[in-house]
Structures are given as structure tokens and as C-alpha cells.
Image (cartoon, helix red, strand yellow):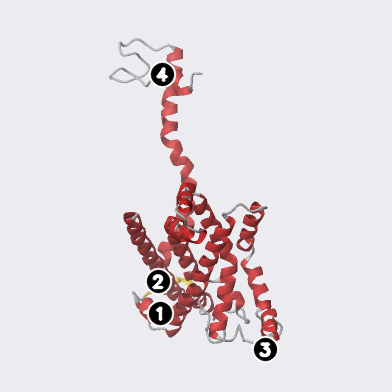
Amino acid sequence: MATRSDTAASPVKGGAAPGRRPDGSPLSKEEKRRAKLSRRWQRDARWSPYTFVAPFFLLFAAFGLFPLIYTGWASLHQVELTAPTDMNWVGLKNYTRIFDDDFFWNAAQNTLTIGLISTVPQLMMAMGIAHILNYKLRASTFYRVAMLAPYATSIAAATLVFVLLYGRDYGMINWALDFVGIDPIGWQDDKWPGQFAVSSIVIWRWTGYNALIYLAAMQAIPQDLYESAALDGASRWKQFLHVTLPSLRPTILFTVVVSTIGASQLFGEPLLFDPNKGASGGAEHQFQTLGLYLYEQGWVNQHLGRASAIAWTMFAILIVIGIINHVISRRLRASS
């Protein structure tokens, strides 16, 4: 079947006048129509791709690039939420001020500890669940869908349920601890219990999501490797250690980086876990993260310039994480 490009005539080249053949004779109506279609098709083939991708770049420029640049500019000024258009140039004062703030370092430390407490058990559990689901099980599709149920649950709904579970006087967890002779714990009042409780919410929400990522990577491993290991007398545990884990190194690195980025941006869980529903992260800032600290400075204390500096500091941390990921990935590829 002839296509549009097949039937359309090539554009007239050379020094002939438009609408004429190279020998100077006029074109027929059919030849003019084909030449017009050919020029239209060339313009369509050249500019259509830009038209298709233009909406993304327009939205990115409006809601991604412009806020990023504006936030960087605002971080160099003293700006208040009550008068966002009144900017007073202060240079790097906002950055030096937050670095001298003990609450910033407290939030950074809380972000680090909550990230470690939530990421390490989460990824280990996800690896174990994926290893189990990798075997032939009945209703395997149901289990895989069930793994995504916590991820699909609203952060607010999940956190409120955990608030009820960790209640000091009425929570089910303290009731179970009292049943075995352990005194009730103030999960929302003390530092380490509060951070553990917030981390448990993160673990519950993201373990199934990472398990499915590991499962997809496991199913891409050639079965010949397992068959060769079985012929050499390797048990399933040794196959997991010497076949599965080395093959999953890029995937494990990816999940570690993504979980680290997610932990650095933790906001909803500690905000809703606070009994006062404030941005302080507890009465003594015991589980205030960098995300909460940014929100407190910008929308509670109304210091937009300082909040912008915190946002760019968090952005710099993410860039450092990305560079570390790139270096480790290159070394892994070189070693393999």
C-alpha cells in the first residue's frame, strides 16, 4: 500500500522558479498538489515531535523550574509570609543562621536516625518477602497485589491508625506490653520510642513496594545460574547468597538511594503522629525531621527566606546522595 510519503513528490530543488520544472515548464495541477503535500509532510515530520513534548516542558517550567529558581533567589533575601513581595537582600545570612540553629542539627540528626531505623529493616524484610514470592505459590497474584495495599493507603489514614495503636493509655501495643509485664511506654513523648514509632509507619508503607521491585529483579535472573548452583550441591540459602544477592546489587543500590531520598523528605508521618498536630515533632522536637523544620520556619514562623535556604540545603544533600550513587554504580559495573 502506498503511503503518504511514497505518493508525495519531492520538493523542487535547484534554481527553477516555484511551480515550474527544472526546464522552466509549468507544473500540472497534480504535480503542484503533490509538491504541496510533500512540503506539508516535511514540516509535520520536523515540528510534530516538539509539539508533542511541549506540554511537559511547559508544565515543568511553570511548576518545577520556576519555583526552584525563585526559591533559590528567595533564600538570599529576608522574606516574610505576610509580605512575600518585600525582599531585603541578606546574602548567605539565612544559610549561616540555620547552620547555627540547634534545632536544624536536631532535625538533621532525627532525619538520619529515623532513616536508618526505617530503611535497613524495611529493605531486609522486602528482600525476604520477594524471595518467598519468587517461588511458585498459589494465589501469587493476590499476594503481590496485597503487597501494594499499604503503599496505596493514604498517609493520613495509616498514621492515624498507628496513633491509636501507640496510644499511651489506650493503645493496643502498650496493652500487649502490659500483658507481659512491661510498663506502658510514652511513644509520643519520648525520643527513641517516638522515632521508632514513626519508622514503623514508614516500614509498613514501603516494604511491599520494595518487595515487588526486588521480585521483578529476581525474576530477571537467568534460571541457568540456579541450575548450575544446584548441580554443584549448593543449598537454597547458598544460592541466595552467591547467586541472588550478587545479581541484585544494582537493584539494591537503587532501593537504598530511593529510600534515603524518601527518608530525607519525611513529612506526613511525623506531622500527624505529633499529638498536637504541629510542626515541632513532639513537645521537645524529639522526632522533628528536616521536612517538618522547613514547614515550621516557613509556614508557622513565617520566615520564607529561611525556609528557602533549608529547602536548598536539602536539595544539596540529595545531590550528594546522587553523586555517591553514581560513583558506586560505576564501581559496581567495573567490578562486574
**Amino acid on which disc 4 is placed:** Ala
Q: Along the polypeptide, which appears first: circle 2 or circle 1?
A: 1
The answer to whether mark 2 and mark 1 are in CB contact below 8 A is yes
Residue 312 is situated, as x and y percent measured from the top left of the image, at: 40, 69
Q: Along the polypeptide, which appears first: circle 3 or circle 1?
A: 1
Distance from disc 2 to disc 4, alpha carbons, whole Å, reads 59 Å
Residue 322 is situated, as x and y percent measured from the top left of the image, at: 38, 62
Local secondary structure at mark 1:
helix
Q: Give the quadrant of the C terminus.
A: bottom left
Q: Measured along the vertical axis of the image, is residue 159 above or below residue 64?
A: below
Q: Nearer the viewer, residue 260 or 312?
A: 260
Q: Along the polypeptide, which appears first: circle 4 or circle 1?
A: 4
What numbered label is drawn on residue 156?
A: none
Residue on which disc 3 sits: 181
Dot 1: few (<14), some (14–19), or many (≥20) neighbours within 10 Å?
Answer: some
Residue displayed at 35% across by 62% down: 323
Distance from disc 3 to disc 2, alpha carbons, whole Å, reads 46 Å
**Amino acid on which disc 2 is placed:** Thr
Residue 179 is situated, as x and y percent measured from the top left of the image, at: 70, 85
Q: Is residue 172 left or right of residue 68?
A: right
Local secondary structure at mark 2:
helix
Distance from disc 4 to disc 1, alpha carbons, whole Å, reads 68 Å
Q: Is residue 71 left or right of residue 170?
A: left
Q: Which of marks 3 and 2 is in front?
A: 3
Q: Along the polypeptide, which appears first: circle 3 or circle 4?
A: 4
- Residue 205 in view here: yes
